[in-house]
Amino acid sequence: MANGILESKNNTNSFSVYPNPANEKVRIALTNNVSSADYSYTVVNQLSQTLQENKLSFDNGTSKEINVLDLPKGVYFMIITSDTGTQTTKFCK
C-alpha cells in the first residue's frame, strides 16, 4: 500500500492507461482477452480523494477514452475494478 492506494488484488485482467503524461484524455486499454465482466474506474489523487468514477464497457472494442481535461496538473491513480479483481495504474497530467 502506497499513499493509501491498493496496487492490485486478484487481478486476472491487465490494463494500460495512455498517453502518460495526459493532456485532455487518457485511454484505458484492455491488454488481454475481453470478458463480459462489469468494469468500473476511479481516478484518485495522491491524497486518495476520488475525483472521477464511472462504469466501463468494453462491448465494442478493447479501449475507452476518459476525459481528464478538468484535472489540474499532477499525479493520479486510475483504479480499474471488475468482478475478478482490481488494478491500479499511475498517470500524470
Image (spheres, rainbow, N blue to C red):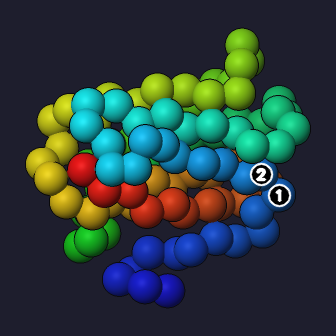
Q: Where residue 14 sits in the image (x, y, percent)?
A: 73, 52
Give the vertical position of 76 relative to 32 (above or below).
below
> Which residue occupies 19% across, 60% down?
74
Query: Image quarter for residue 53?
Result: top left
How would you rate the neighbour count of disc 2 (Cα within 10 Å): few for under 14, some for 14-19, many for 20 or more?
some
Percent of width and height locating residue 69: 20, 32
Q: What element carries label 1?
A: loop
Residue 60 occupies which quadrant of the picture? top right
Between 58 and 18, the one nearer to me in the picture: 18
Residue at 64% over, 70% down = 8
**Residue 12: assigned label:** 1
Dot label at residue 1: none
Q: Is residue 72 above or below residue 23?
A: below
Single out the residue that lies furthest toward the left.
72
**Is label 2 in contact with label 1 (beta carbons under 8 Å)?**
yes
> Of the residues shown, which amino acid type is indicated by label 1?
Thr
Q: Say few, some or many: other residues with alpha carbon within 10 Å of mark 1 (under 14 / 14 to 19 / 20 or more).
A: some
Q: Position of residue 26 (x, y in %)?
A: 41, 36
Quadrant of the image occupied by residue 91: bottom left
Gap in angstroms between the C-alphas marked 2 and 1: 4 Å
Evaluate whether residue 33 shows in this view: yes
Judging by the rendered image, the residue that carries numbered circle 2 is: 13
Q: Residue at x 43, y 62 (%)?
A: 90
Residue 54 visible somewhere in the drawing = no
